[in-house]
Image (cartoon, helix red, strand yellow):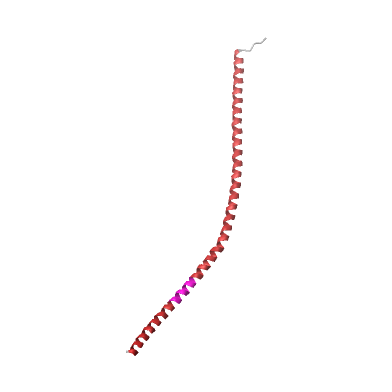
Amino acid sequence: MLSASPFGQNAASTIRDSREREKKEMSDLNDRLATYIEKVRFLEAQNRKLAADLDLLRGKWGKDTFNIKQMYEGEISDARKLINETIKQRDELEKQIRKMQDELSDYRKRSIAMFIYSNKLFI
């Protein structure tokens, strides 16, 4: 019978050990790749959810602010009209006050003149 030489057994053992290391290394790399792929999928799903939430918020924000703007624009317009009318009324009243003050001044002058005239009559 042929017996295996120590060199042949040593070479076979070295090749077997090398293949076992490569096999373990490939298994570790596959595990790392699977973990990476799982993490990427999770992040993509999270990104899609956040994008959907953002779109929803953008839609609500624009709609709500538009409704509020429309609601208050009417009130602001009415308030401006009221302010303008009030300013006109104030101006008119100030004009009437000046006119009445002038009339009062005239009546005082006449009253004083009449008083002086009536006192002259009795003197």
Give the residue displayed 34% in from the left and 87% down from the top.
Answer: 119
Give the residue displayed 55% in from the left and 63% down from the top.
Answer: 75
Q: Is residue 62 left or right of residue 117?
A: right
Residue extending furthest toward the left: 123
Which percent across, then down, holds residue 111?
38, 83
Q: Is residue 79 left or right of residue 52?
A: left
- Above-or-below relation of 118 to 4: below
Q: Quadrant of the C terminus?
A: bottom left
Residue in the foreground of this view, choosing between 58 and 75 = 75
Q: Is residue 46 left or right of residue 123?
A: right
Q: Quadrant of the N terminus?
A: top right
Per the rendered image, the range of residues in magenta is 87-97
Residue extending furthest toward the top: 1
- Check if residue 27 falls in the magenta segment: no
Give the residue displayed 59% in from the left and 43% down from the top.
Answer: 47
Which percent across, then down, holds residue 82?
52, 68
Which percent across, then down, holds residue 27?
61, 28
Which percent across, then down, holds residue 90?
47, 72
Which secondary structure class fits the magenta region best? helix
Residue extending furthest toward the front: 122
Q: Which quadrant of the view contains residue 2?
A: top right
Q: Which quadrant of the view contains residue 106?
A: bottom left
Q: How many marks?
A: 0
Give the residue displayed 59% in from the left and 52% down from the top.
Answer: 60
- Above-or-below relation of 77 to 113: above
Residue in the foreground of this view, choosing between 123 and 82 = 123
Residue in the foreground of this view, choosing between 4 and 28 = 28
- Above-or-below relation of 101 to 25: below
